[in-house]
Amino acid sequence: MTLENLSRNKSFGGWHQQHNHHASSLNCKMRFAIYLPPQATAGTKVPVLYWLSGLTCTDENFMQKAGAHRIAAELGIAIVAPDTSPRGKEVADDPEGAYDLGKGAGFYVNATQPPWQSHYQMYDYVVQELPALIEAQFPVSGRRSIAGHSMGGHGALIIAIRNPEHYQSVSAFSPISNPMNCPWGQKAFSAYLGPQEDTWRQYDASELMRTANRFVPALVDQGEADNFLHTELKPETLLTAAQTSGYPLQLRRHEGYDHSYYFIASFIDEHLRFHRTHLKS
Ligand SMILES: N[C@@H](CCC(=O)N[C@@H](CS)C(=O)NCC(=O)O)C(=O)O
């Protein structure tokens, strides 16, 4: 597996790096970012937190805006941030250039419908290809947690709930909690997965949490001043689902916070400490 190093910056004693590689699951070239804390050396492997970003993002938003490096360096956790969709000229995009479908909006599903299915296989990329690459190329252990924001919060939740043996913990900021029942999710799922609601259920965090019988500790933070709270995010549906199955979900609601990275930056240290507790044990 060939990695092309694009950038390397020292940060809080560790290193932030960006790399390109050919992603076979997505059938295109992909960029990801990794933060390696100072504890990660040839002789010391550190656990990894995968971060999935929201609509319109790349690997850069979280690394530049969340302010996570200081605490990741303190706790000895690597952070990996993939892109939010396949990229390149050959990759289908929304014909009208909408921000919520196509490039920047892969929704972490495996598309089954034309013209999307030849590249939009983000679920397989994040669950299988990327961790295999990271664990082969960097001084990291096989202990993983996953987190994300908005569309990426949806991605982190469905991936952890469906793969409890692969992740020690999951957290999300402002996740799209019930995509089958909101405009962003219905638009994306119709396009990528077709009209069958049974297929949609496999990618809906509330549906999956309601019927789960193997658990991953979960933390969700939601701002009360988030413009998308009532139309797109619906965290109360996730909470009801967790109560039905007994899923270990902690949902916290925060007065005055919106959907932006200012909210994420305000609580990211608590998310990293939450993950560290589970990555260590
Ligand atoms: N552009 C859209 C919303 C896009 C949006 O809020 N994206 C969030 C994730 S869902 C984000 O992280 N944006 C990039 C950033 O803040 O750096 C709108 O204005 O309605």
Image (spheres, grey):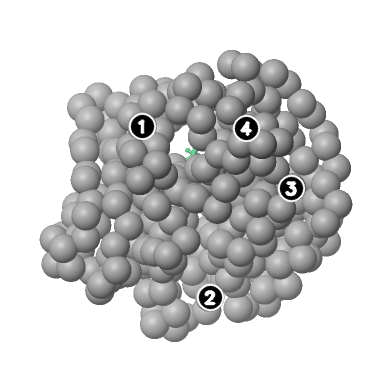
In space, the residues marked 2 and 4 are separated at their CA atoms by 39 Å
Q: Which label was assigned to residue 193?
A: 2
Q: Which label was assigned to residue 40?
A: 4
Label 2 sits on a secondary structure element that is: helix
Q: Sequence-wise, which precedes: disc 2 or disc 4?
A: 4
Label 1 sits on a secondary structure element that is: helix
In space, the residues marked 4 and 1 are separated at their CA atoms by 18 Å
Residue type at the position of mark 4: Ala
Please report the residue visible at 41 percent of the width from the left and 74 percent of the height from the top: 202
| Mark 2 vs ligand 1: CB below 8 Å | no
Q: Are marks 2 and 4 in contact (CB under 8 Å)?
A: no
Residue 274 vs residue 95: left or right? left
Residue 211 percent across, percent down from the top left: 25, 74
Q: Quadrant of residue 241?
A: bottom left
Q: Sequence-wise, which precedes: disc 1 or disc 2?
A: 2
Residue 233 percent across, percent down from the top left: 32, 50
Residue type at the position of mark 3: Gln
Label 4 sits on a secondary structure element that is: loop
Q: Which label was assigned to residue 137?
A: 3
In space, the residues marked 3 and 1 are separated at their CA atoms by 25 Å
**Quadrant location, the N terminus:** bottom right
Tell me the residue that label 1 is attached to: 273
Q: Nearer the viewer, residue 268 or 190?
A: 268
Label 3 sits on a secondary structure element that is: helix
Q: Sequence-wise, which precedes: disc 3 or disc 4?
A: 4
Q: Can you say whether 18 is above or below 201 in the image?
A: above
